Amino acid sequence: MAAGKISREVEQFIHEKIHSVEQLEVLLLLSRTPEKEWGPAEVSQELHIQPESAAKRLFDLHAAELLILSQTSDRLYRYKPATSALESAVRGLAEAYTVRRVSVINLIFATPRDHIRVFSDAFRIRKED
Amino acid sequence: MSQFISGAITMAYLVAGLFFLRYWKVTRDRLFALFALAFWVLAGQRLALALTTETAENTTVLYVVRLIAFTLILAAIVEKNRSRNPKD
Amino acid sequence: MAGVVYILCALTSLACAVLLLRAYRQSKVRLLLWSGLCFIGLALNNGLLFLDKKVFPDVDLFLLRSLPALAGLMLLLYGLIWETAE
């Protein structure tokens, strides 16, 4: 596989949570500013993407337990992974995306061969952390 | 109609088994080898079922063959969960 | 004896379906959706086989129990061909 030396943890994380480069960019943007609350409008301005699209990514990342909703508004999100494992995976992903951008992007556009691997891994009952 | 459906099911099992064989060849993941085998056993069972005249005894034997196929699938799952990292 | 076999096969198929669909929810790899649905079809097939042979031995449910298997396998083949072609 063309993944270079991306750790298994990060690879797993990409397979499970990241479905597009846009989603990755939104995640990394919010993870760089964990204290700031972001809404679709600011994210769309910052990353030059459609506001609806930004809203969808935020919603998905929230569902993936990587963001929490602001207490004041239900359209504002803040980076706060539910577990330390997720947090460390995102840190690893951010680093990998700086150093091995192409490998990370290749992983996101998982090749059919990865679909086969995911099929086989589906039969693993306990999830590896 | 039932003969036609039996034939279609048999063919589908055979083709799916062939795909699993290819995945096994690519990944060397034993799960796929066992799945390929299981699907071919199911194809064989369907074929034999269509060929036999319906005596109760025969069909029971054939359903034991079906059991073998599903045991293969179970074995694949068990093996997947026994070894931590079967592929690496 | 035969009844136990049918139930066991149904349970195995169901387990496969659950595992595949659970993994589909996490990974969104559609191959898992199609194969999960296939195993639901096979579970139905085995469950109906039990009903056919053990509960209603006088009625022939061949079509009713075979169609879920056929439909499931067609979905599986669609997934295998469409989602994993290189």
Image (cartoon, coloured by chain):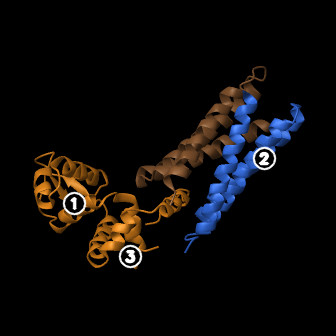
Disc 1 marks which amino acid? Val
Report whether mark 1 lies on the same chain as mark 2. Answer: no
Report whether mark 1 lies on the same chain as mark 3. Answer: yes
Residue under pointer 2: B44
Which residue is rendered at x = 61% and y = 34% of the image? C68
Colour that chain B carries in the picture: blue
Mark pair 2, 3: CA separation = 44 Å
Residue under pointer 1: A26
Mark pair 1, 2: CA separation = 52 Å
Which residue is rendered at x = 16% and y = 64% of the image? A34
Q: Is residue C33 shown to the viewer in this render?
A: yes
Residue under pointer 3: A6
Q: Disc 2: which chain?
A: B
Q: Residues within 10 Å of mark 2 (few under 14, many from 20)?
A: some
Residue B3 drawn at (x, y percent): 76, 31
> Which is in the foreground here, disc 2 or disc 3?
2
Colour that chain A carries in the picture: orange
Colour that chain C carries in the picture: brown
